[in-house]
Image: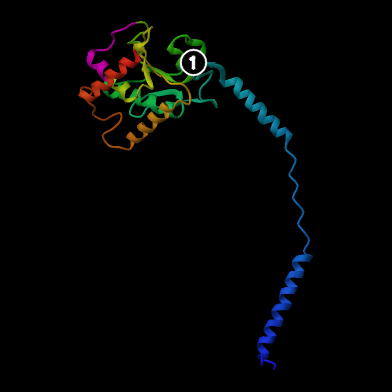
């Protein structure tokens, strides 16, 4: 017995089958796209880039590290790592290694300015040429953009006792804030009480951790340089004394 199938349904099915066959035949018949060839490299451009890199190396880098392990550079503001940067809240501009080191040394200078002695133009000596520093001393760190001298005329190299007791307490409180990443030249065998320098090598995690802490302070009221800090608080005195013993 034959089922009674509506004529409209039969026509719909037939149209679907024909349409499917037509699409399928079009897919099969469509030719594949040719793979676009990779353009030949511009050899002249590559040579220019290579020469520019070599020129930069010769112009900036020394291949010699300062006492703390950072590479000394011949020039500043010239596609190296050391650039002129302002110290907020002061008229100062220093030449310093960009990034975390800049942040840490600016914090050190700022606290000195607010809490020990107000600083004016010419009071801070930062980058110095590699030829102008004694490489066996911590002053060589200035040539790598990782050190500053604050008021060097008032605290000459080789002399000790330039700070009053409360000033030195404040200075050691600043160092404690910096968790041993910054060292004071007054504690060196050949003292330089004006010198403050990074005391960890490149890629040391302590540098990154301290920079992160200081960045956090910048967005927290009542913390960081420029806020009222009492270095005579027992916990701060203890932290400063402990670090002084470690860095002696």
Mark 1 burial class by Cα count in 10 Å: few <14, some 14-19, many 20+: many
Name the quadrant containing residue 111: top left
Quadrant location, the C terminus: top left
Q: Quadrant of residue 122?
A: top left
Quarter of image, res 55:
top right
Answer whether residue 73 is magenta in the image: no
The front one of 85 and 1 is 1
Q: Position of residue 147 (x, y in %)?
A: 42, 19
Q: With 6 as the anchor, is 215 left or right in this view?
A: left
* Residues rendered magenta in the picture: 159-171
Q: How is the image coloured?
A: rainbow
Percent across and percent down for residue 1 are 69, 94
Q: Position of residue 44 (x, y in %)?
A: 73, 33
Quick check: 26 left or right of 194?
A: right
**Residue drawn at the location 45% of the way across and 29% of the way down:** 99
Q: Is residue 116 visible?
A: no
For residue 33, say whether it is visible. Answer: yes
Residue at the image point whose x is 28% and y is 8% from the top: 161
* Left or right: residue 37 compared with residue 171: right
Location of residue 6 with respect to 111 vertically, above or below: below
Q: Which residue in the structure is indicated by mark 1? A: 66
Above or below: residue 3 compared with residue 62: below
Find the residue positioned furthest to the front. 1
Task: Determine whether 106 is above or below 135 in the image.
Answer: below
Count of marks, rendered view: 1
**SS for dot 1:** loop
Residue lying at the far left of the rendered structure: 233
Residue 166 in magenta stretch: yes
């Amino acid at each position: 017995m034959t089922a009674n199938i509506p004529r409209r349904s039969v026509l719909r099915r037939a149209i679907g089958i024909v349409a499917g066959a037509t699409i399928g035949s079009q897919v099969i018949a469509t030719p594949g796209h040719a793979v676009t060839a990779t353009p030949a490299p511009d050899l002249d451009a590559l040579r220019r880039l290579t020469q520019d890199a070599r020129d930069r190396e010769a112009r900036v880098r020394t291949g010699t590290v300062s006492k703390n392990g950072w590479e000394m550079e011949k020039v500043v503001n010239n596609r190296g790592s050391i650039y002129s940067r302002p110290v907020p809240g002061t008229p100062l501009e220093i030449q310093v290694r960009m990034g975390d080191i800049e942040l840490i040394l600016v914090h050190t200078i700022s606290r000195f300015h607010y809490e020990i002695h107000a600083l004016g133009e010419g009071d801070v000596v930062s980058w110095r040429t590699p030829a102008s520093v004694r490489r066996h001393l911590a002053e060589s760190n200035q040539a790598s953009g990782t050190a500053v001298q604050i008021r060097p005329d008032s605290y000459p190299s080789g002399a000790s006792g330039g700070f009053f007791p409360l000033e030195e307490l404040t200075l050691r409180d600043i160092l404690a804030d910096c968790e041993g990443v910054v060292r004071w030249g007054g504690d060196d065998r050949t003292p330089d009480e004006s010198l403050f320098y990074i005391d960890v090598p490149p890629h040391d995690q302590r540098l990154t951790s301290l920079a992160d802490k200081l960045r956090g302070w910048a967005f927290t009221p009542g913390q960081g340089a420029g806020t009222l800090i009492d270095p005579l608080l027992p916990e701060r005195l203890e932290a400063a004394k402990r670090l002084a013993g470690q860095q002696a």
